């Protein structure tokens, strides 16, 4: 056992992860263990999380224990570190969450071409934990077979749509998942983003406490497979708005209903009285899927201060002087 542990921690990708963990504030040994389990057994981890892994059916007590160990424990640690935020209890969503980003914003994240250090983005990432963007070797990008899609009986295709961005994450994931991950160029990452956008899927920048409390991945999510979107529908607020909301030009809208059909968040409907599309602003996450599919050009995204600040890396860098 000692030999196996020694081999684990001398592997270059794991050593780099551990060294980066040592430089990360408020990152505990449990976080390191959690991060290793997440990276090593991500398909089991996510499969249990979305309730689709065979363990949930065959060994439900063990599966419940696994889920409690790596959700309740993580949430408890955050609760201890940050007992309340704006008078609200800290929840599991604070430890693992996604930020909706537009296609252009997602492209910026995979083509930024310089190291970034943007800590504590509270206005952009409205969670108590995991809200830093620290990009090292941002051109080191891997694509991973989507764990959410892999866990479904009839998944959306293709599978290889999750982008792991920067170090130590890309090396860590490719080493742990050699059959499901491969290295790609920033240009290939942009192509994946564009193809997923054409399929009507939502780009989410994901942050996780066990992944050094940082941004580490862009997932391209469909509402039928994505565990985070499933959790959002079931009342666990794992997703933050892009900072935009859909706006309808009623004079241009013909009431075809296509936008309502494609909206991943169920935020659009055709009003019977007016015959035009209407937006449920509370449900709208500002993903822009509807905008690109309106043949009349009647839809657009507009900034909504109540939805928070966008995650647009170039603007954020310029604001702190990193872009100069």
Image (cartoon, helix red, strand yellow):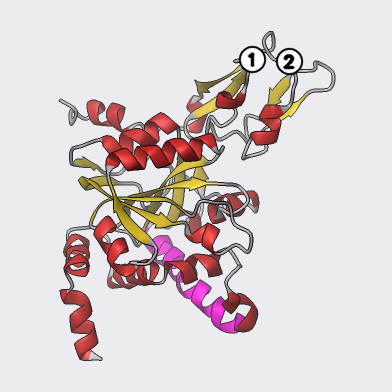
In the image, farthest residue toward the bottom: 1
Residue 102 is left or right of residue 139, and the answer is right
Please identify the quarter of the rendering in which residue 138 is found.
top left
Residue 9 is left or right of residue 249, and the answer is left
Confirm whether the magenta stretch covers residue 257. Answer: no
Confirm whether the magenta stretch covers residue 76. Answer: yes
- Check disc 2 and report the residue beneath it: 254
N-terminal of the pair, mark 1 or mark 2, is 2
Residue visible at 52% across and 62% down? Answer: 150
Q: Is residue 309 visible?
A: no
Q: Which mark is residue 296?
A: 1
Residue visible at 25% across and 35% down? Answer: 112
For the record, the magenta segment spans 59-81
- Circles 1 and 2 in contact, beta carbons < 8 Å: yes
Q: Nearer the viewer, residue 69 or 136?
A: 136
In the image, farthest residue toward the right: 273
Q: Which mark is residue 145?
A: none
Q: Is residue 54 above or below residue 99?
A: below
Please identify the quarter of the rendering in which residue 151 is found.
bottom right
Which of the image's four quarters has the C terminus?
top left
Q: Is residue 1 above or below residue 78?
A: below
Q: Secondary structure at mark 1?
A: loop
Q: Position of residue 230 (x, y in %)?
A: 61, 53
């Amino acid at each position: 056992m000692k030999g196996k542990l020694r081999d684990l921690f001398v592997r270059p990708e794991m050593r780099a992860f551990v060294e980066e963990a040592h430089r990360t504030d408020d990152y505990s040994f449990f976080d390191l263990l959690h991060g290793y389990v997440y990276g090593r057994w991500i398909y089991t981890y996510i499969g249990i999380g979305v309730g689709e892994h065979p363990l949930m059916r065959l060994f439900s007590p063990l599966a419940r224990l696994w889920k409690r160990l790596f959700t309740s424990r993580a949430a408890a640690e955050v609760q201890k570190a940050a007992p309340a935020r704006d008078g609200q209890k800290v929840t599991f969503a604070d430890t693992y969450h996604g930020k909706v980003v537009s296609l252009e914003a997602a492209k910026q994240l995979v083509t930024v071409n310089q190291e970034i250090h943007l800590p504590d983005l509270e206005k952009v990432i409205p969670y108590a934990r995991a809200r830093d963007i620290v990009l090292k070797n941002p051109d080191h990008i891997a694509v991973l077979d989507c764990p959410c899609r892999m866990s479904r009986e009839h998944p959306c295709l293709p599978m290889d749509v999750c982008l792991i961005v920067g170090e130590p994450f890309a090396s860590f994931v490719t080493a742990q998942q050699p059959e499901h991950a491969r290295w790609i160029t920033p240009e290939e990452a942009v192509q994946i983003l564009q193809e997923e956008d054409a399929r009507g899927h939502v780009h989410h920048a994901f942050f996780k406490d066990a992944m050094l409390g940082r941004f580490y991945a862009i997932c391209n999510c469909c509402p039928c497979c994505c565990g985070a979107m499933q959790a959002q529908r079931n009342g666990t607020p794992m997703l933050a708005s892009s900072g935009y909301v859909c706006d309808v030009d009623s004079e241009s809208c013909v009431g075809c209903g296509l936008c309502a059909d494609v909206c991943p968040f169920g935020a659009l409907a055709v009003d019977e009285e007016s015959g035009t599309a209407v937006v449920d602003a509370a449900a709208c996450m500002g993903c822009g899927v509807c905008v690109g599919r309106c043949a009349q050009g009647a839809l657009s995204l507009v900034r909504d201060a109540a939805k928070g600040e966008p995650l647009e890396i170039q603007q954020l860098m310029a604001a702190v002087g990193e872009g100069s």
